[in-house]
Image: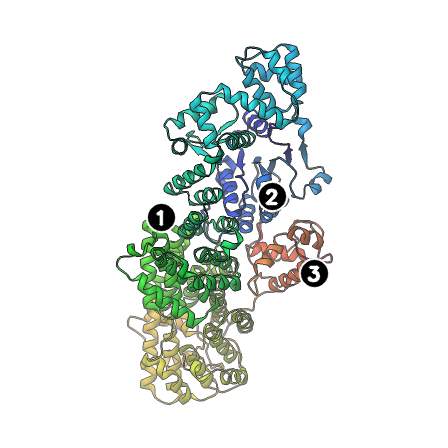
Amino acid sequence: MAVVSAPAGGGKTVLLRSWTSEADLAGRVAWVSVRTDERDPQQFWLAVLGALRRTVPGAALIRELTAAPALDGWAVVERLLRDLAPLDDRVWLVIDDVHELGSADLLRQLELLVMRAPPELRFVLATRHDVRLGLHRLRLEGRLTEIRPADLRFSLDEARELFAAAGTAPAESALVMLHERTEGWAAGLRLAALSLAGHPDPARFAAEFSGSERTVAEYLLAEVLERQSRETRHLLLRTSVLERVSGPLADALTGSTGGERVLQELEAANGFVVSLDAARSWFRYHHLFAGLLQLELRRTAPDEVDALHRAAARWLEDHGRPAEAVRHAQAAKDWTSAARLLADHWPGLHLDGKAATVGALLGRFPAEMRAADAELAVPAAADELAAGSLAEAERFMGLAARRTESVPVTRRSRLDVQVSTVRLVLARQRMNLPALAEEARRLRAVADAPDTAPLGLSGDLRALTLVNLGIAEHWGARPTEAEAHLEHGIALARRIGRPYLEFLGLAHRASIASVRASPYARAEELSRQAIELAGRHGWTDEPAAGIAYITLAAGLVFRRRHEEAADWMLRAERTVRAEVEPMTAMAVRYVRALLELARGRHQEVLATFQAAERLARLLDAPHWPLMRTRALRLHALVRLGETGRAEQDLAEISEQDRARGEIRMAEAALRLARNDPHAASAALAPVLSGAVPVPPTTWLAHAQLLEAIARDALGDPVAAGTAMRRALDTVGIDGALTAFLFHPPTRRLFDRYAPDSGRHTALVDEIRGLLPETETGTGTGTGTETGTETGAGAQGSGSTEPARPADSPRLLDPLTRSEIRVLRYLPTNLSAPEIARELSVSVTTVRTHVRHLFTKLDVRRRSDAVAVARALGLLAPSPDAPAPAPGAATGAADTGADRSVSL
């Protein structure tokens, strides 16, 4: 690693650009220029990823990534490490102006990348001053090359070459004097060379300036400006308020034309105007030059500065650059316009993955305005919501509600929609069903309106509203309305070019289809569309992808494709964050329990239910989403022969919840196990009549099978045969064989009622081969308290799928964001105190997180935690060895000695 550290004008950028152009590094250098006061991790890392993708090795390894609302900088670093693990060709990552990284998280993320990057990725950092990147460790290890100001100072011979290249050859005495006065400072010498070109008295010029770098620079700036035409001076001064400038933007600020031509001529003539794109349409001024131009503007035209910022804000808003527009309105202290701009554009900025930018812009408003402005309160609430700070989000929403009357009447409709949309998401995350229903009711009128133009809604806000309303209605058990709003939202998202909203809508539309559509193929099609879209944009690790993963997994479980289902479950468990989307995390636990029940791993079902109970504490209405998983727990207890515990569980469920279809089926299985077929049939009656729905439809086959078993035990062969045929008809739609295997009938009973010929002949033969020869005592009415696990996991007559091997990686509980952050440091050689310092937390906090990690990953040592995390895809593979395959035995990590004692 190399660090080039020197003040402004020291020649850092010129040196590095010269090196990259002369060292035969074509296609192997990724160059990133950090924007002024960069505080948005997502935007910075997208720039890094894009630069690396433009290298020859990076193009083959690094997947594309599109900005998204929930994209986390830490996750992008982990993804980058994963993509770069096989790198075997040298690549240089040059990051210019590292001192502009204004976020502590950004610096930590960059340090983590430096620590864990493969050896063939070399870093070159240019900065005006040292930054906190743990460089002392690299220095002690002899892996750091440092270039300081003394190394960058021009020698006399180098100064002579510089002047010659600029077309001037001062007398030796003048050259020596200039070199001494500038102390070899690169920017001073460049400015002197420009000023000397055509100067009538070079010796006098060289003798007249002296003093500090700033004094010399200001003097030489005056010289440079004097040599420019009036038109050029006017352009340079008036556009100095901009971070970057284009010809049209320059024209807007100068009130003239030809700005692009002037900028291109300046770039060609000297090193103080830099082109930012291949088309030479956007430019920036050298930082030192820009600062001096701004000083000159304030000295000569102080009354014009605010007007220039306002003009820039108007142009930037009109040309689709709202964040820059807000910054310029703030620079002009036009707080009202800045607030209006941010209120209008924050939904689009969030969708562009610029949530951190929104947070930074909010922080620039005066404190008294942030505490009183209703329109600013809504993006502030959304900002807190994205960070998982629900209480703070509610506080800001309360402020918005109290201050609504202060908003102009023409803007209140838009504000009302924004408030309801944010409240809807908040209610969904808390699973506050009354609030969810109320906000959904308010938004439904807006979403269903044929024309929303009078409301002043942008396409972004309308699409965001439709998709979030559909998601809320899905969780609120209103699937018909949910489908309609999601379909409308998906279509609008496609039309306005918002792929993230399309992806979010598709994932939840698939989830709805899985419990409503039959055959299941429609849910699978939608899931795969969502996953394909996620893959195209690099969102496969986004929490929303978890919805599509579990939808696929559930269908595969019912079709008895357990290994495929397990793969999708691992992906879902890796992506979903319980503290951000507890309802989705609950759904993940349910499908995990369903998979384990289907495999015959009934103890795993009980453990998964305990994890779901812990998650339910995050919800305001925990019993509703927990009930489906509780039903699976009852099935598992019955299969284990623990009917006493099952009875106790059932007694603890309220009458209202016992009436639910999934609980009724579990109760029927329990009654059959306790030799009470009459009670079993009574429990099933509302399900079979359709009075109580059972999502998904494939569960209906299970109810029909239990009814066949009950009717056989009651001596009613006609009803038993009818129920068996209906079960086969239902299973035949999707091939959902597992419905016959949760509580399987004996082969003798099945043969008695299953037709020998007809449209289900192949299906009957397949099911027959999976059934036990004799009664097991758990699902056919023997009433015993024990029994063997022959059910859903049976691979043949009487067999059962083995319990999970001890070395099979499995995430027992979802990891929190803080635990994941600590996990990412475990592959390094840092001790617990060192990790604590990196994360600005206490050592006790780090050790607590490590204990939780060990428990959730089911390991006892740090090296095993790293290996299991890599097998689960939570960490990038070691750059020194291929990543272990899921299910492989855990081994030592790439860090050498095990560090569990120090943690």
Kind of residue sitting beneath label 2: Ala
The residue where tag 1 is placed is 497
> x, y (%) of residue 270?
51, 22
Placement of 118 over or under 467, stated as above or below: above
> x, y (%) of residue 751?
37, 79
Q: Nearer the viewer, residue 289 or 567?
A: 289
Q: Is residue 655 left or right of residue 184?
A: left
Placement of 586 over or under 451, stated as above or below: below
Q: Reading the chain from its start, which is encountered first: label 3 or label 1?
A: 1
Q: Nearer the viewer, mark 2 or mark 3?
A: 3
> x, y (%) of residue 74?
56, 50
> x, y (%) of residue 89?
56, 36
Secondary structure category for the residue under label 1 = loop
| Crowding at mark 3 (Cα within 10 Å: few <14, some 14-19, many 20+) | few
Q: Reading the chain from its start, which is encountered first: label 2 or label 1?
A: 2
| C-alpha separation, residue under disc 2 versus residue under disc 1 | 35 Å
Q: Nearer the viewer, residue 452 or 851?
A: 452
The residue where tag 2 is placed is 117
- Is the residue under label 1 in contact with that under label 2 (CB below 8 Å)? no
Q: Nearer the viewer, residue 875 or 271?
A: 271
Residue drawn where x is 30% and y is 73% of the image: 757
Kind of residue sitting beneath label 3: Thr
| C-alpha separation, residue under disc 3 versus residue under disc 1 | 47 Å
| Crowding at mark 2 (Cα within 10 Å: few <14, some 14-19, many 20+) | many
The residue where tag 3 is placed is 844
Kind of residue sitting beneath label 1: Gly
Q: Reading the chain from its start, which is encountered first: label 2 or label 3?
A: 2
Q: Nearer the viewer, residue 665 or 727?
A: 665
Placement of 695 over or under 578, stated as above or below: below
Image quarter of the C terminus:
bottom right
Q: Inspect this view and state whether residue 898 appears.
A: no
- Is the residue under label 1 in contact with that under label 3 (CB below 8 Å)? no
